[in-house]
Image (cartoon, rainbow, N blue to C red):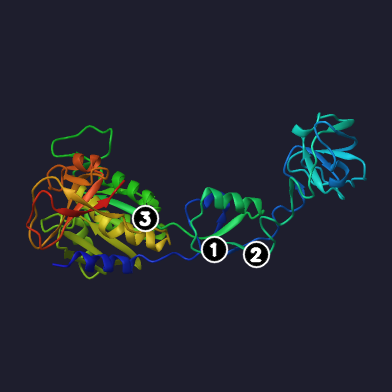
């Protein structure tokens, strides 16, 4: 059987980054910059007031105090957004608002709290040093400097800076477009009545959510029965819109394995057994140049396989940080067994405060309920058959 590490390398080698594209800044949140960003303008773009108050010459109010106020005529009113820049004459004051352009000649701003707030002749009760409460042009960003680097994730703060610089677009690594296909004639969409032998489709919903959570984009999430021709036709229909195809089901050793039957005849997909539980039957390859990863059909196997093989490769192809789930160690609270020769990924509940982890639910791959309430995967290596309570084991933090 193929080792977990070997299959991870195979999958990682298939999922490649898309070419960088320029996108509107409103569409770039969570993506990774593919190019440095150089400031086209300075921030601030002009000297402006950091306070609501009065623009003055510092020398004119040098002697102002609570017991010795200075009175100055208010010659101008300067709200934020005023585009003509007046000149402040000695012995006068201009009432000014936060963010408004500083009048030519002004050397300080006196906060309104240190005055009587008058609009004709203002009484100033505090001295001001030169430069007080003035934001100088370019003190945050100087035009021509590199303000963001390729490889940074676009966050709300990055978007705020980009917008403040007047940039309408960012060059980013685009999301991977993933086609998620659930197979099985027994599958029925939610809301429809079930006939004997039918089940509600869940893998597509679950894996589409996992793709989005990993930072990708779901191109489509169709389900198909066990008809080979219909399965192939569906794949061909969606291929132009997909950078990656994920299928679930149809890869085991029984009859009616539609994915194996459709793609196992030298079409570029290799079907293997991986030494792990759950998730032993796997497949990987390409279809007309598009990577295709075939996952088992049992829901726990499908999601664990996505976590182990697909999620890290998907995030790496988009340049995202933290491609791997955080690995921790914790003290096992119970005795556990594991099939020797296979790496086991059990559902677990990890208590970081107590530094303990407990297996959660049976290890079988159809027990989806337990996975829904687990906060970690408990990893037991291939050489382990029994683990005693009190042993420190590795857990994958799924929180």
- Which is closer to the viewer, label 2 or label 3? 2
Q: Where is residue 206 in the image (x, y as percent from the top left)?
A: 29, 45
Q: Residue at 18% across / 43% down in the picture?
A: 186
Do the numbered discs 2 and 1 sit on residues whose CB atoms are within 8 Å? no
**Could you tell whether 350 is left or right of 218 in the image?**
left
User: Which disc number belongs to residue 149?
Assistant: 1
- Which is closer to the viewer, label 3 or label 1? 1
Question: Dot 1: what SS?
Answer: loop
Q: Where is residue 12 in the image (x, y as percent from the top left)?
A: 31, 66
From mark 3 to mark 1, how far is it between C-alphas?
27 Å
Residue under label 2, please give it: 145
From mark 2 to mark 1, how far is it between C-alphas?
11 Å
Q: Position of residue 277 (x, y in %)?
A: 14, 55
Mark 3 or 1, nearer chain start: 1
| Position of 312 relative to 353 (above/below) | below
Q: Of 289 and 383, which appears nearest the observer?
A: 383
Q: Of 32 and 203, which appears nearest the observer?
A: 32
Q: Where is residue 215 in the image (x, y as percent from the top left)?
A: 40, 53
Q: Which residue lies furthest to the front in this view?
A: 67
Q: Residue at 30% across / 44% down in the picture?
A: 205
| Position of 117 relative to 106 (above/below) | above
Do the numbered discs 2 and 3 sit on residues whose CB atoms are within 8 Å? no
Question: Dot 3: what SS?
Answer: strand
User: Which disc number belongs to residue 178?
Assistant: 3
**Could you tell whether 81 is left or right of 246 in the image?**
right
């Amino acid at each position: 059987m193929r080792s977990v590490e070997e299959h991870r390398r195979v999958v990682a080698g298939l999922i490649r980054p898309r070419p960088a594209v320029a996108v509107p800044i409103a569409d770039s949140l969570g993506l990774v910059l593919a190019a440095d960003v150089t400031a086209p303008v300075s921030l601030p773009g002009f000297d402006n007031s950091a306070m609501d108050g009065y623009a003055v010459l510092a020398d004119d109010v040098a002697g102002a105090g609570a017991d010795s106020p200075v009175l100055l005529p208010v010659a101008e009113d300067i709200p934020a957004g005023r585009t003509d820049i007046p000149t402040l004459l000695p012995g006068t004051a201009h009432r000014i608002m936060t963010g408004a352009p500083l009048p030519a000649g002004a050397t300080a701003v006196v906060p309104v709290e240190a005055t009587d707030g008058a609009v004709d002749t203002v009484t100033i009760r505090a001295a001001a040093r030169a430069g007080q409460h003035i934001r100088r042009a370019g003190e945050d960003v100087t035009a021509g400097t590199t303000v963001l680097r390729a490889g940074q994730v676009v966050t709300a703060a990055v978007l705020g800076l980009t917008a403040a610089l007047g940039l309408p677009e960012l060059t980013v690594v685009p999301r991977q477009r993933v086609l998620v296909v659930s197979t099985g004639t027994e599958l029925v969409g939610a809301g429809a009545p079930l006939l004997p032998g039918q089940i509600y489709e869940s893998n597509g919903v679950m894996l589409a959510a996992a793709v989005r959570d990993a930072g990708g984009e779901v191109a489509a999430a169709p389900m198909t029965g066990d008809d080979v021709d219909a399965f192939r036709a569906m794949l061909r229909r969606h291929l132009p819109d997909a950078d990656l195809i994920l299928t679930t089901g149809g890869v085991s050793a029984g009859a009616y394995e539609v994915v194996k039957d459709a793609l196992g005849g030298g079409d570029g997909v290799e079907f293997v057994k991986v030494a792990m539980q759950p998730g032993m039957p796997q497949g990987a390859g390409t279809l007309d140049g598009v990577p295709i990863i075939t996952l088992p059909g049992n829901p726990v196997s499908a999601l664990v396989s996505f976590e182990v093989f697909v999620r890290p490769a998907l995030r790496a192809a988009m340049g995202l940080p933290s491609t791997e789930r955080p690995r921790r160690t914790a003290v096992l609270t119970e005795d556990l067994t594991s099939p020797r020769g296979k790496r086991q990924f059990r559902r677990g509940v990890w208590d970081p405060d107590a530094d303990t982890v407990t297996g959660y639910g049976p290890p079988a791959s159809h027990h989806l309920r337990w996975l829904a309430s687990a906060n970690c995967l408990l990893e037991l290596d291939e050489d382990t058959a029994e683990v005693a309570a009190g042993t420190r084991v590795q857990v994958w933090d799924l929180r």
